[in-house]
């Protein structure tokens, strides 16, 4: 094994341990209802060669934020390794929906009606019904994707009732320079009101906080693969 391989696999084990420790710090944690947050390894900006050791170590859940980049590495990797579950975690343009649903297994970035409609149409054509998350712009930041928090519940209902999408949860990226805890708590509250089960929240620097706030999916890139080249 190369140095790079040892490093990514070692970090995978470290992160898995931290996830299980954070889970056990959940307030009111109930042993009869165990929650195991899913680690989504975010492989954007890293090559198939960088990702392979993590797959070889048995990990199967990955995230990419661009359709085109994902197309350049994942078809081959998915052929080589069984049961990969690939999450699209970045903004999705309607003209990329067809390609996206061909390659991805979960769409985390549903954030507008036009996209919901297109997803429905293309999934019908492809005979698929992928699990989706609604992305919420939890800090109401101008530059970020996501539906506004005050519209989130209604939007979830619309996706379900009007477009028949299988909305399984909510996803967010809190403001970069603020304490994330209150934003994670806000997303958890919205998910409860919208009656959806999963919460995709928490990245390299804040996943332990996110888990304590109820994250069911954490999306981790840097802490696993190292810093991305800009
Ligand atoms: C890049 C990215 C991540 C991973 O971020 P890290 O800080 O590298 O762990 C998570 N979620 C989304 C939506 C991303 O684009």
Image (tube, helix red, strand yellow):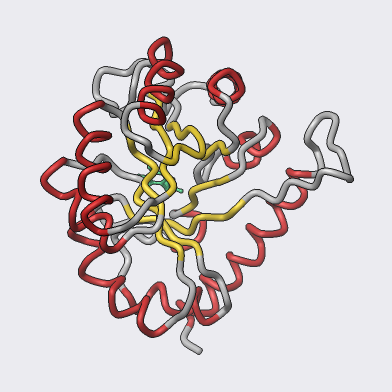
Q: Going 44% across and 54% down the picture, which residue do you hit?
A: 222
Residue 138 point in image, percent of width and height:
43, 21
Compared to 77, does 118 lie above or below? above
In the shown orientation, is residue 224 left or right of residue 15?
Answer: left
Of 198 and 1, the residue lying toward us: 198
Compared to 216, does 141 lie above or below? above
Location of residue 116 by image quarter: top left
Location of residue 85 by image quarter: bottom left
In the shown orientation, is residue 149 left or right of residue 26?
Answer: left
Q: Going 48% across and 32% down the picture, which residue do you hit?
A: 170
Residue 36 point in image, percent of width and height:
70, 51
Compared to 120, does 148 lie above or below? above
Q: Going 27% across and 72% down the picture, which residue do you hit?
A: 73
Q: Residue furthest top?
A: 150
Q: Going 30% across and 50% down the picture, which residue do you hit?
A: 65
Location of residue 155 by image quarter: top left
């Amino acid at each position: 094994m190369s140095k790079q391989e040892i490093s990514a696999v070692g970090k995978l084990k470290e992160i898995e341990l931290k996830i299980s420790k954070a889970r056990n710090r959940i307030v009111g944690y109930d042993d009869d209802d165990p929650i195991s947050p899913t680690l989504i390894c975010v492989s954007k900006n890293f090559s198939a060669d960088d990702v392979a050791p993590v797959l070889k170590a048995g990990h199967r859940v990955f995230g990419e934020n661009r359709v085109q980049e994902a197309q350049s590495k994942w078809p081959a990797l998915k052929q080589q390794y069984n049961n990969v579950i690939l999450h699209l975690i970045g903004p999705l343009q309607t003209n990329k929906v067809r390609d996206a649903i061909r390659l991805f297994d979960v769409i985390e970035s549903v954030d507008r009606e036009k996209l919901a409609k297109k997803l429905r149409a293309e999934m019908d054509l492809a005979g698929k019904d992928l699990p989706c998350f609604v992305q919420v712009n939890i800090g109401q930041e101008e530059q970020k994707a996501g539906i506004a928090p005050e519209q989130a519940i209604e939007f979830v209902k619309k996706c379900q009732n009007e477009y028949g999408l299988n909305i399984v949860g909510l996803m967010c990226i809190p403001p970069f320079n603020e304490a994330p805890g209150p934003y994670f708590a806000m997303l958890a509250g919205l998910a409860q009101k919208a009656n959806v089960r999963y919460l995709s929240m928490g990245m390299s620097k804040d996943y332990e906080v996110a888990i304590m706030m109820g994250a069911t999916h954490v999306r981790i890139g840097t802490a696993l693969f190292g810093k991305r080249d800009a």
